[in-house]
Image (spheres, coloured by chain):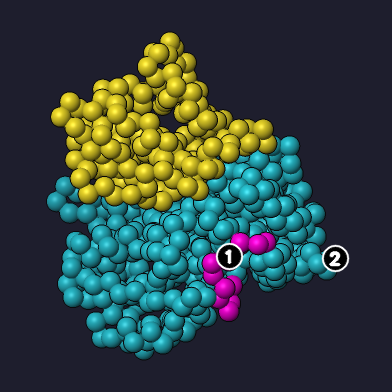
Amino acid sequence: MEDDIRELYQEVILDHGKNPRNFRHPEDATYEADGNNPLCGDRLTVFVKVGGDESIEDAAFEGRGCAISVASASMMTDIVRGKKIIQVDALFDTFHKMCMGEEIGETPEEFKDDLDKLMVLSGVKQFPMRVKCATLAWHTMNAAVHGKEAASTE
Amino acid sequence: MTATTTVMKSDTSNSYDVVAIRADFPALNLEINGYPHAFLDSGASAQKPNQVLEQMDQAYRFEYANVHRGAYTLSQLATDNYENARTAVAKFMNAKTPDEIIFTRNVTAAINLVAHSYGREFLKAGDEIIISHMEHHANIVPWQLLRDAIGIELKVVPVDDAGNFLMAEFEQLLSSKTKLVAVTHVSNVLGTIVPIKDVVLLAHIHGAQVLIDGAQGIVHEGIDVQDLDADFYAFTGHKLYGPTGIGVLWGKLDLLNKMPPYQGGGDMIENVTFEKTTYREAPARFEAGTPPIVEAVGLAAAIDYVSDIGLTNIAAHEQSLLAYATPALSAIDGLTIIGQADNKAGIISFTLSDIHSHDIGTIIDARGVAVRAGHHCAQPLMDRYGVAATARASFGLYSNTQDIDQLVDALNYVKEIFS
């Protein structure tokens, strides 16, 4: 169990949790959505600037939450920049499976580096109650780029 | 179950036999993730002693049938058990009569019953209900629903930084518009024991009626409803070492009998025709449908259990744990206790540096320690103290100093990980 804890709270997660990247509100965001985890009270807002070719020019977030949810939002906003929405959807799908401990199948070459980075969050699969912490930012991103105002993990 | 021997005092003296008590609770003897089970979440729901489990097992195996219906032996036995449980609750709360005891699903259901039945019968647009800043959502949202339905106003008694209920401010909020005061007996987050007797006195001077949410209060110091003289008092079985699915609404009998039914169905009627139905008096009026029969038996067994130990002894034991835990936790660098009211029950909410309570909860679970993490269904109170969430340790009659030592060690482990 303590090994699982150490795997979940790896240095890189603690670093992103303490010093989140892209923690700001970009004035020129084209989309934003609120994410809410009503059972624990975690809330965040994801801001996205999407360019003409459906690619993400900027992504940022604000809000509060546990180390896992903040680290996940921080890493996500780094990773999605420069990607097309359709690629982000595919990445979310794979990341979600990773967190659930499901088989992710063949990894497309284009996502290999990103998934290697996101792998540090897959420690949540040992903690079913915490999966929603790792995926809240992604649900919110998904809601934002698909024109929904809010996402909830419940 | 009928033993009259009373175990005495706190576990710092040798007469409160916490070891013997713990042996009654199978869940406390579990090993969790390789550590002894330090269960410090009784405020959310308490563990159950063998005495409760055995009584319920007996009731299901050998004494079970529906109540108030069949003219056969088991049905009569089940009915007797169910009504005896009502009598046991009445005695436990010192109600005037068992007819004042309505079995509900939990406190939430009890408060919703009052909001719907009493609220819609006696309140009108412009009337005011006073609640406090430290209410559980269960004592906020039903009144908001009523407000939205009939146009009453909600007023909120503030708390100070330590978590004390501000009596002078409460008095200022009272007016001829105040029809109901609905406050908690003990805060589930801060542990504050509200001086509810003073609340009742002041409210009654202004002609307002009073509902007390006793979910935490009855567990930590019991209740004498005649002495308190409130109009409603609600509590739940599962926090009192009894089963889930059963709660109690106590109300003054004449008031209950003036209130219309909340839910319609079997058992609550006098006579039904398609043109007109008449209703039975309390408590039957408010217990439509098959009730929680075996849960009532379990609740009565739980009441027997705590009564055998003695509520005063339990309160003294929990106070000694509070006195042990408060300095031990405060000594942890970065730990802040939220709620330091003058009069507190065995509940300690805290934050640890800027570490989120869910991270604390997950990590200390790896060391066998169970606490509640989150907003505790009291979001307005979290906002009041400027925190998103807290971790909360709450003590039960079986808690001991080892649980607290284990918590302190586990919190140091959290700090080690986050260092």
Q: Nearer the viewer, residue B147 or B304?
A: B147
Which percent across, then down, holds residue B225?
Answer: 50, 74
Q: Which colour represents chain B?
A: cyan
The residue to which callout 2 is attached is B14
- Magenta-tinted stretch: B332-344
Within-10-Å neighbours for mark 1: few <14, some 14–19, many 20+: some
Q: Nearer the viewer, residue B66 or B210?
A: B210
Q: Is residue B240 visible?
A: no
Give residue B109's quadrant in the image. bottom left
Mark 1 chain: B
- The amino acid type of the residue labelled 2 equals Asn
Callout 1 secondary element: strand
The secondary structure making up most of the magenta span is: loop
- Among the chains pictured, the one given yellow colouring is A
Q: Is residue A150 left or right of residue B4?
A: left
The residue to which callout 1 is attached is B336
